Amino acid sequence: MIDRKHHKIVFSFFMSLIMSCIMSLVISIFNVGLVSNIIYIWLKAWVFAFTIAFPTILVVSPLVHKLVSIALKEEDDAA
């Protein structure tokens, strides 16, 4: 198993893997339809999307965490 100190990297890996998989499939079907070679088209798009998504999530996630902290209301300690 991977040590917990690598949580951010492992999280980013799986998040980018799953999101790029889903999005590349949806966009491939949207652009070309359910053609006979859709699996090839999708896998080719997925590899490209993942290579962009993984480093992007690594770079952008600290900003997203800050934005979420700003957007969420602080819990009231008195309640």
Image (tube, rainbow, N blue to C red):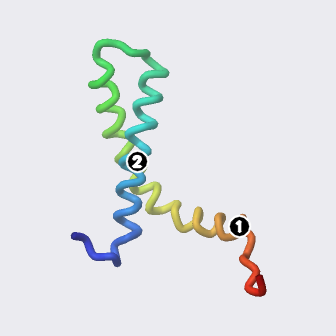
Estimate the x, y position of residue 54 in percent, counting from the top left.
Answer: 39, 54
Q: Is residue 2 left or right of residue 77?
A: left
Q: Secondary structure at mark 2?
A: helix
Estimate the x, y position of residue 70 in percent, counting from the top left.
Answer: 71, 69
Amino acid on which the number 2 mark rests in the picture: Ile
Q: Which residue is mark 2?
A: 52
Instruction: Check contact, mark 1 vs mark 2: CB within 8 A.
Output: no
- C-alpha span from label 1 to label 2: 29 Å
Amino acid on which the number 1 mark rests in the picture: Leu
Estimate the x, y position of residue 13 in percent, counting from the top left.
Answer: 35, 57
Which numbered disc covers residue 72? 1
Q: Quadrant of residue 55?
A: bottom left
Q: Residue at x 41, y 34 (%)?
A: 24
Q: Is residue 76 left or right of residue 18?
A: right
Q: Quadrant of residue 75?
A: bottom right
Estimate the x, y position of residue 3 in percent, counting from the top left.
Answer: 28, 76
Number of on-image labels: 2
Q: Residue furthest bottom?
A: 78
Using the image, determine if residue 38 lies above or below residue 46.
Answer: above
Q: Earlier in the sequence, mark 1 or mark 2?
A: 2
Q: Residue furthest left?
A: 1
